[in-house]
Image (cartoon, grey):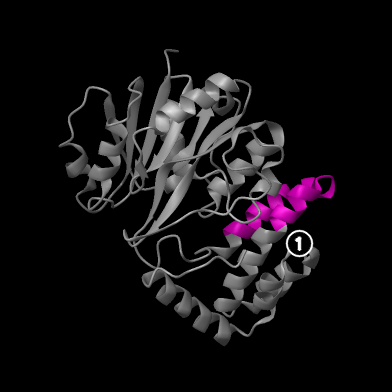
């Protein structure tokens, strides 16, 4: 296996943006990589657009549409290099992204996953920073407790992580039976078993193009419930994991109430230790669904006006 990075990019109907994504990768200051692009059966012109990009390091695979987990896993199996960095087809890397990951890997070689920080860019005009707990700023090293650190925003985000290929070959891949929350599931699995290396230097942009992209808590409540159930047994002996899962339970409960799914709302709410929610979240948990819908509309309005603040 040669040095150093394999980069796996998954694309589904991203013709309008994917060239920007690929160019942000090709323009890295660190150039020792192969670029694997998996088009997951796009129905727009994504594949045609990808084929116009010429670089000897690029290999493009076209598969039938099976979902993001299957597409990512397909790319992981093709990866030849020691470390595999991931990106979705509509996010961006700053030119120092791979350099920062390389420094982190060289400094802390025994981690099961590595990540840099990122910023969220809403509607290509408003940028916000994520909210991490329990880490100093700046931070460069091994995170003491991944679950504590990720109670507000996850320090692991798909387009900013890098996984040693040897960890992937041990079976740490995306669960293809989960259609939503598959990334959270994998991060939990890796963080339970290995150290997490993190740099708080921002090297990637999470591009949120419209209100339906990333802003909805989940499009598939049963999938996220299944993620919770997979790791529920371990929270009995890991208080930080319990707190982390309770924050995720809160998100599921909120979305269930917004959809008038009171059965899942009540079920999930009962499993939450309310001590793990701050005052803002406790208020939100008990608000009527009609008020939550108004607040969600107001959230979009504030985002458009560049005024939004997280409830964490």
Q: Residue furthest top?
A: 2
Residue 147 vs residue 203: left or right?
A: right
Q: In the picture shown, does residue 71 fall above or below 42?
A: above
What residue lies at 45% left-to-right and 60% top-to-bottom? 214
Q: In the picture shown, does residue 103 fall above or below 116?
A: above
- Name the one closer to the observer, 79 or 101: 101
- Name the one closer to the observer, 54 or 180: 54
Q: Main secondary structure of the magenta part?
A: helix
Q: Position of residue 12 (x, y in %)?
A: 32, 49
Residue 114 vs residue 225: left or right?
A: left
Q: Is residue 198 visible?
A: yes
Task: Locate the N terminus by quadrant.
Answer: top left
Q: Position of residue 228 (x, y in %)?
A: 68, 54
User: Residue 212 lies in magenta, yes or no?
Assistant: no
Read off the magenta span. Answer: 223-245
Q: Residue furthest left?
A: 52
Q: Position of residue 57 (x, y in %)?
A: 27, 23
User: Residue 229 lies in magenta, yes or no?
Assistant: yes
Q: Which secondary structure lies at badge 1? A: helix
Residue 18 vs residue 250: left or right?
A: left
Residue 190 in which image quadrant: top right
Judging by the rendered image, the residue that carries numbered circle 1 is 276
Residue 182 vs residue 90: left or right?
A: right
């Amino acid at each position: 296996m040669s040095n150093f990075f394999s980069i796996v990019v998954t694309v589904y109907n991203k013709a309008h943006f994917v060239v920007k994504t690929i160019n942000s990768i090709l323009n890295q200051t660190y150039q020792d990589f192969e670029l694997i692009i998996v088009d997951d059966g796009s129905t727009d012109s994504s594949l045609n657009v990808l084929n116009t990009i010429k670089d000897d390091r690029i290999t493009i695979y076209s598969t039938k549409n099976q979902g993001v987990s299957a597409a990512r896993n397909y790319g992981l199996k093709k990866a030849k290099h020691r470390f595999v960095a991931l990106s979705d087809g509509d996010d961006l890397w700053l030119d120092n992204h791979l350099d920062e990951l390389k420094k982190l890997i060289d400094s802390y070689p025994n981690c099961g996953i590595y990540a840099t920080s990122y910023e969220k860019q809403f509607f290509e005009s408003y940028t916000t920073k994520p909210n991490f707990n329990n880490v100093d700023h700046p931070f460069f090293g091994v995170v003491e407790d991944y679950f504590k650190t990720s109670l507000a925003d996850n320090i692991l985000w798909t387009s900013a992580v890098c996984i040693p290929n040897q960890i992937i070959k041990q079976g740490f891949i995306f669960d293809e039976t989960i259609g939503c929350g598959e990334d959270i599931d994998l991060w939990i699995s890796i963080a339970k078993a290995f150290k997490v290396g993190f740099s708080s230097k921002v090297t990637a942009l999470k591009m949120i193009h419209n209100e339906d992209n990333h802003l909805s808590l989940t499009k598939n409540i049963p999938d996220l419930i299944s993620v919770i159930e997979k790791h529920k047994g371990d929270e009995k002996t890991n208080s930080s994991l319990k707190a982390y899962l309770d924050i995720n339970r809160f998100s599921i409960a909120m979305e269930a109430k917004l959809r008038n799914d009171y059965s899942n709302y009540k079920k999930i709410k009962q499993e939450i230790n309310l001590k793990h929610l701050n005052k803002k979240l406790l208020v939100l948990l008990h608000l009527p669904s009609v008020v939550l819908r108004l607040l969600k509309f107001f959230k979009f309005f504030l985002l458009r006006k560049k005024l939004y603040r997280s409830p964490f």
